[in-house]
């Protein structure tokens, strides 16, 4: 399959093509010389032989032109080869929806030859990226497990003419190393949630903070705003702050440990819905009330449909939206680049909101639940 290159390399490719068309290369010069010698020799031959050879040469030239004309058409019909690196699709409902969205878009019917790799570990993702580069994919699509450590492999991709598109999560790397970043504003998600919590007007905030995988953009964004608020307000206290790595069972264990210690708390701030679910399981086991007007405020993120149903029932208090449907945006970027156009924006932010249990409707659950 013809190797595609990122848009920044298209200019060089077109320049090379222009030079080849105007002056030809060594091969063209050799061909021209050969034709000249053949023509000279033909002048010395008998008229019949000359006519026969001239006709053969014309036929060969026509066949060559036909082959050259057919080449772009064949190339246009080729599948675009993409390597997609994502987090474990079983990590959460959000990730399951995200993976399904990508698989529905990047199909042979839509013009793609897609390969997938999954891991929650940065080093394993980097190894997968290196493998995709060796396989000469046209585009590398990346949802990084960690924000750091990607400069070298992205430079390798760029050197190989492979376009990199980030989705779902940002990374700490130069913008020159990728075509576009299609992400949620994780900092805004965290700030929206913390602002909502501050608006509840509690006399004191004793918070069990359950974090996602450390170093991920989602964890950093959802943690940052809470850390800043706790540092600024004497009435805000972190009873515990631990990672459950997006896992429901680990979250349940964290909350159960706090309950067993006898430490008072009145807020569960979980950085995804599955961890909030695990936290609630520990509360239910200990007969601790939670939700609207109850002893403990429960907060989650991602807006799984079942989680929004918990809000609607008043069992949870808040859920922050994280939009998993990025495939159509990625497809547009690729199509633009294939047509020689760089994306209009380097960073494309998903539109998101937060939901309050006292305001959410059934329509919201059906529209925004994933």
Image (cartoon, rainbow, N blue to C red):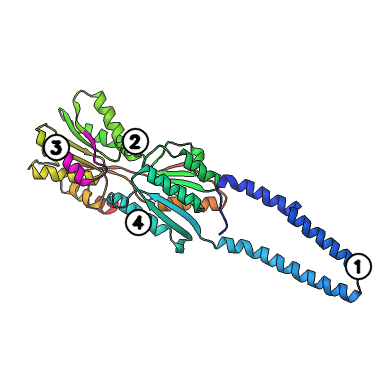
Residue 231, position as x, y percentages in the image: 26, 25
Q: Earlier in the sequence, mark 4 or mark 3?
A: 4
Decide: is 2 above or below 282.
below
Q: Secondary structure at mark 3?
A: helix
Say which of 151 and 92 sits in front: 151
Q: Secondary structure at mark 4?
A: helix
Segment tinted magenta in the rendering:
241-254
Q: Earlier in the sequence, mark 1 or mark 2?
A: 1
Q: Give the spatial CA distance, label 1 vs label 2.
A: 80 Å
- Label number found at residue 257: 3
Q: Give the spatial CA distance, label 3 vs label 1.
A: 99 Å
State whether residue 24 appears in this view. no
Decide: is 121 above or below 49.
above
Give the residue displayed 18% in from the left and 39% down from the top. Answer: 254
Residue 54, position as x, y percentages in the image: 83, 70
Judge whether residue 251 is colored magenta.
yes
Q: Nearer the viewer, mark 1 or mark 2?
A: 1
Q: Earlier in the sequence, mark 2 or mark 4?
A: 4
Residue 229, position as x, y percentages in the image: 26, 28
Q: Earlier in the sequence, mark 1 or mark 4?
A: 1
Q: Give the spatial CA distance, label 1 vs label 4.
A: 69 Å
- Label number found at residue 187: 2
Which residue is disc 1 drawn over?
A: 43
Judge whether residue 2 is colored magenta.
no
Which residue is disc 4 drawn over?
A: 100
């Amino acid at each position: 399959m013809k190797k595609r290159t990122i848009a920044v390399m298209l200019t060089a490719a077109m320049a090379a093509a222009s030079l080849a068309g105007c002056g030809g290369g060594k091969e063209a010069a050799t061909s021209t010389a050969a034709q000249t010698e053949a023509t000279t020799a033909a002048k010395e031959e008998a008229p019949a032989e000359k006519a026969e050879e001239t006709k053969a040469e014309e036929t060969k030239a026509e066949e060559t032109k036909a082959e050259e004309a057919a080449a772009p058409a064949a190339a246009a019909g080729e599948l675009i080869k993409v390597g997609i690196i994502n987090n474990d699709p079983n990590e959460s409902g959000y990730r399951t929806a995200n993976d399904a969205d990508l698989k529905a878009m990047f199909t042979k019917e839509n013009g793609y030859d897609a390969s997938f790799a999954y891991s929650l570990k940065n080093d394993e993702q980097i190894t997968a990226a290196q493998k995709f580069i060796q396989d000469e994919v046209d585009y590398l699509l990346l949802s990084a497990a960690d924000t750091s450590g990607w400069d070298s492999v992205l430079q390798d991709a760029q050197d190989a003419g492979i376009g990199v598109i980030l989705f779902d999560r940002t990374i700490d790397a130069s913008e020159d190393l990728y075509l576009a970043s299609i992400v949620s504003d994780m900092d805004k998600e965290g700030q929206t949630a913390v602002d909502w919590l501050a608006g509840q007007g509690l006399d004191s905030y004793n918070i069990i903070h359950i974090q996602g995988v450390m170093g991920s953009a989602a964890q950093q964004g959802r943690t940052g705003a809470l850390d800043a608020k706790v540092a600024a307000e004497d009435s805000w206290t972190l009873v515990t702050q631990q990672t459950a790595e997006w896992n429901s069972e680990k979250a349940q264990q964290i909350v159960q440990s706090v309950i067993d210690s006898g430490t008072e708390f009145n807020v569960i701030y979980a950085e995804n819905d599955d961890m909030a679910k695990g936290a609630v399981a520990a509360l239910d086991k200990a007969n601790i009330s939670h939700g609207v007007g109850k002893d403990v405020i429960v907060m989650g993120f991602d807006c799984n449909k079942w989680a929004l149903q918990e809000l609607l029932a008043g069992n949870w208090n808040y859920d922050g939206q994280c939009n998993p449907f990025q495939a159509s945006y990625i497809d547009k970027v690729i199509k633009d680049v294939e047509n020689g156009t760089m994306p209009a924006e380097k960073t494309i932010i998903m539109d998101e909101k937060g939901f309050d249990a006292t305001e959410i409707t059934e329509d919201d659950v059906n529209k925004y639940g994933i």
